[in-house]
Amino acid sequence: MDELTPRQQLFFNYLEREISHTGKAPSLRQAASDMGVSHAAVSQLMKMLEAKGMLRRDGFYSRKIVLLNRFQKTAGRMRWREVPVIGDIAAGLPLYAQQEWAGSVVLDADIYRGNNLFALKVRGDSMKNAAILDGDIVVCEPRQFASNHEIVVALIHQEEATVKRFFLKENRIELHPENPEFTAMSYAFDEVLIQGKVVGVQRGPEVMEKICGTYVLKKSGKA
């Protein structure tokens, strides 16, 4: 990227600050007012930053401004999306389905593009061989159907939720764990409601610390 002039850098810093505070870029009118310059001056600054690969406008007359990183991809500060964590889910025995929110998780919208995503915190280790561990947060796309082998969130008997691998058999639904210490569960069609498909896993520092601690113990022969 070309070096910015002091005036261009000042304007770019202003855009970064506004986006950090509000989550979106200001309109041209707001930018002109805040900077104390004319609309024409703001438009010219936009064109120069765009030419230097610092931002992108969605359409010539569009007011939507997207800041870019040095690889000319959407900057991280403009890619985030907040997804609700709506409770816990069992990766073991089914857990009572909770409807209340239990916080939120911030995701990269370039990776997680689905609509109305939700997240659940995992309890248990029946899905550990699918890299879903106790304490992880699974990101889910709302679904009321599933294909064989997909990892899904299933509501059992309309009150218990679990995350398992889905299999449709001739006269039943089977929910399979990914841990040989657990057995597959079999249900009639009217006993299971698919709530969503697992599309990603978020792992926090507490889970990583547990993994690293277990690894050290095994290496030392104490596990």
Image (cartoon, grey):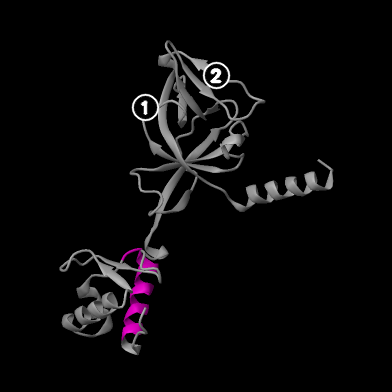
The answer to if 206 sits in the magenta stretch is: no
Q: Quadrant of residue 60?
A: bottom left
Residue 171, given in percent of the width and then of the height, sits at: 43, 10
Residue drawn where x is 62% and y is 39% of the image = 134
Which type of secondary structure does the marked residue at label 2 adopt? strand
Disc number for residue 145: 1
Residue 81, given in percent of the width and then of the height, sits at: 39, 54
Which type of secondary structure does the marked residue at label 1 adopt? loop
Write the start and end of the magenta stretch as one range: 8-24
Q: Residue furthest bottom?
A: 6
Q: Residue furthest top?
A: 171
Tell me the quarter of the image containing the C terminus. top right
Residue drawn where x is 35% and y is 84% of the image = 4
Q: Do the CB atoms of the residues marked 2 and 1 lie less than 8 Å apart?
A: no
Q: CA distance from mark 2 to mark 1?
A: 18 Å
Disc number for residue 129: none
Q: Amino acid at mark 1?
A: Phe
Q: Amino acid at mark 2?
A: Met
- Of residues 43 and 118, the one drawn nearer to the viewer in this rendering: 43
Q: Quadrant of residue 150?
A: top left
Disc number for residue 185: 2
Position of residue 151 in the picture relative to residue 211 (left or right): left
Lower sequence index among marks 2 and 1? 1
Above or below for 188 versus 30? above
Residue drawn where x is 57% and y is 20% of the image = 184
Tell me the quarter of the image containing the N terminus. bottom left
Residue 46, given in percent of the width and then of the height, sits at: 24, 77
